[in-house]
Amino acid sequence: MQTDTRQLSDIGTCTLRPMSQTDAKSVLSSLKDIAKTQTDIADLLAGETPLKDFVVAALSLSPYLRDTAVSHPQVLVQVLGRPLIPYLQACVESARDAWKSADAGKPLTDAEIMTRLRQAKRDIAFAIALADLSRLFDARETTRWLSDFAGAAVSAAIDHLLLSAHDAGKLNVVYVAHPSDQSGVVVLGMGKLGAFELNYSSDIDLVVFYEPHAPLITVPDDAPETFARLLRRLIRILQERSGDGYVFRTDLRLRPDPGATPLAIPVEAAMLYYESRGQNWERAAFIKARPVAGDIKAGEAFLRELTPFMFRKYLDYAAIADIHSIKRQIHAHKGHGEIAVKGHNIKLGRGGIREIEFFVQTQQLIAGGRMQELRLRATEPMLHGLARANWIDTETAEELISAYWFLRDVEHRVQMVRDEQTHVLPTTDAELKRIAYMMGFADVPAFSLELSRVLKTVERRYAQLFEQEAKLSSETGNLVFTGQGDDPDTLGTLRKLGFERPQDISRTIRTWHYGRYRATQSVEARERLTELTPELLRVFGQNKRADEALLRFDHFIAGLPSGIQLFSLLGNNPGLLSLIVNIMSSAPRLADIIASKPHVFDGMLDPRLLAELPTRDYLAERIKGFLATARHYEDILDRLRITASEQRFLIGIRLLTGVITGVQAGHAFTDLADLILTAALDAVLHEVETAHGKFPGGRVAVIGMGKLGSHELTAGSDVDIILLYDHDDEGSESDGAKPLDSIRYFTRVTQRLIAALSAPTAEGVLYEVDMRLRPSGNKGPVATRINAFAKYQREEAWTWEHMALTRARALCGEESLIAEVDMIFREVLGQSRDVAKVTADVAEMRGLIDKEKPPSDVWDFKLIPGGLVDIEFIAQYLALIAPARGIATPPGGTSTVDVLRLLGPALIAPADLDTVQEALTLFTDLSQIVRLCIEGDLELKDAPAGLVELLCRAGDSPDIKVLEADIRRLSKAVRRIFQATVKS
């Protein structure tokens, strides 16, 4: 076999032109600097050769290549001085062996393999780019080498992870010299990686399954978590950017139902999913699937077993309807009108790469069951196969093959400029000239002419696939959402409905029909959505900013794991549709919740939803019933997350629709948190007692601090807690199989409780936990014994800690210990204090907050002078000085509203009390709505239109300017009252 000796010095003539003479001079200057230490570069510059012209032009056209050459000159030297194929093979082998350490059988650190893989990627990416730009390689070779390297890199990373898990005792590899062999770990490369068609700056799509009964797995129950950790490390190893760059952006979302499944699932579970629920888009995705790493034999066996799912026995005309709805065809899509070159998406746009791939895959889905020759992965061989099978004529095949590789060349050059995962052509003449020159054209017009010809060819051939038109009509007018072009009558109808940007709306709805979202990938879902569309547009059109609301709805369904249930619900419940419009127009945070947790919709169907607020007893019964069938500890934690997210959402809906006030919402959010914390503590205690037994006389109580203590939680609040405990003095350790001393035992309880609340599971996080209000703050132990807590509060606590104690209350735990806690609170808060000292301390504390946490603007209701902090400080101050004035202080955990109601009349002037209470009501209502609707601070200029309307409604203001004036008036008055009350 003849050795391939091609090298860059073989270039006969340079077809590239530098970006400009100025750029060429700049590159030459950089090369001269390199030449001072690299004799090969000095030799290159000494002559006038096509190679020199090519290197200068290539580096001037690609800032990425130039930066790489300047920062790593050896990369340029290596590729110039040797045959390309052996060099690329060495790079691939270097990546494949990157997991191996000098100490056989011992794993490297993640950092070591990350560095090795990144250096190998840098070397091969640089060499491939020059080989491609010089035309020594065509796009076929470029994509093949990139795919080979990706497979080697993923294989090395998988071997490294398996070996490290073996070394840690988590897994048991059969052969430490070949960790993946007989591992049962299936790693499939999807899409372009599977078909050996990877693009220059591509991400890689992987799907990972494992065989639970393989010798690799020692404890099957631990496998899901073990593989989840390993795959999170895999993503980090491959895609995290470091000083050496990155290897590949990595996507694991093509696995079954990614919104509800772990990163890796058992082979049997995957098979069951595909056999029972697999969709046509998943069939299309697996056509290109290929084992790229792990246990290759197991991967091949998996795909063989999956063949009946991918390729049906008979001509699959049932799939044809789905395919039509994935990408509908219309009269307006048969080549009319010019295709703009600037800003065109080479992959997804008209006449783009995706249309060629889709052209091929539709034929494979329909006929691949009967014709094995139509089961190939790569696009070009499949087009030849379709022609041989007479599914298309030879002329169509040749046209599409030529177009495909031309567009892949353009795609690679767009990405080579700055190593970016983009498929969009530049929008400026200067940058478009760069692409034209990289393609070897003399100027932009010549490039644009040829590109337009290719795109129109693809568009014409693609259009012949689909003959059907999908039309919708409504009483308002024509509604047609098919193909790539806009129907003029439809645009007019959309304007009449209330949309200001009808082209954007038309394009969005066409996207739904294309099935690009998971929610619209089943035939039934698209049919239901098609039926719903006229009413959907009518209801959204009634909104003040209809376009913004519908585009947020589009974002919402883009994130849904499935859509048929939602579209059916909306079609049968007009009130629910109106509520969805309300959410989309005002509350992005709620929209994100329903996108990620569709189960929250179940509660929205209850007719009592907007009629009453669930009582604490009602919530307790719901939680108890839902937990009753939990199978194990992790299941309890997931169920708590499910019910908490649903109930938080439903409380939020009541607040959004004005059924409850901000103060009522605070109580409801807090009642829910109390019950969730109680259930979590019960589960944690049972888990700890199972492992370590009971501690003699052991008692535990959880104290709620801050807004949790004072019944003022918001939708996005974390929870401030303290865990107190007590036990028999003579008890030395717990009585279980793994006994612990008292400190370790109750610390373990606390740590498990924090994890139960804040650790992310498949169902998310319950609450973020803050324990900084415990004695001695972060420096103190996480669990505090009751006598130490009492001593600290009596003898050591600062004034601000007693201020915090005014909001504290015991939430759950052992009743006798709760009674002791309540007695301590009453004793400490009932002390007669030095009013002057308290006054000075509170004033100093508020001044410190002013200095260290200044408000962002008037909409920062918490921190503005005269805002919620001032009002809370007034209430806490009154609670601390009340005993000295002969007034009984309210019990700990009393809300700010109730403290002011109970103490205000005796300690504040009536007019001032009215003002503070008015401000508290307004700021509470506003802050509750803001925390419900958005994440982070309120930026009024960027706020959704519906949110502004909600704020005006809550403030009983005709517009936002009047509301802002009210806020300024009240906050100014409250600051004056604070200064008068807390006389420093």
Image (cartoon, rainbow, N blue to C red):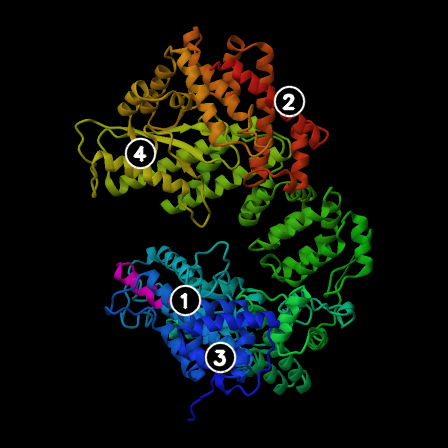
Cα distance, mark 4 to mark 2? 42 Å
> Which is more foreground, mark 1 or mark 4?
1
**Sequence order check, earlier mark of 1 and 4:** 1
Q: Residue furthest bottom?
A: 1
Q: Nearer the viewer, residue 396 or 805?
A: 805
Q: Where are the magenta residues, as a range? A: 157-171
Residue 42 sits in quarter: bottom left
x 57%, y 19%: residue: 974
Q: What amino acid is at disc 1?
A: Arg
Return the disc, 3 or 4, that comes first in the chain's sequence.
3
Residue annotated with mark 3: 45
What kind of element bears circle 3?
A: helix
**In the image, is residue 170 part of the stretch drawn in magenta?**
yes
**Residue 642 coordinates in the image, percent (x, y):** 48, 43
Q: Are marks 3 and 4 in contact (CB under 8 Å)?
A: no
Residue 495 image point, x, y percent: 80, 51
Name the N-terminal-most of marks 4 and 2: 4
Amino acid tagged 2: Arg
Q: Crowding near pointer 3: few (<14 within 10 Å), some, many (20+)?
A: some
Q: Residues within 10 Å of mark 1 (few under 14, many from 20)?
A: many
Dot 4: within a 10 Å radius of its alpha carbon, few (fewer than 14), some, or many (20 or more) residues? Answer: few
Q: Is residue 458 left or right of residue 474?
A: left
Q: Name the element at disc 4.
A: helix
Can you tell which mark lies on residue 969? 2
Relative to 569, is 854 above or below? above
| Residue that carries the numbered disc 1 in the rendered image | 118
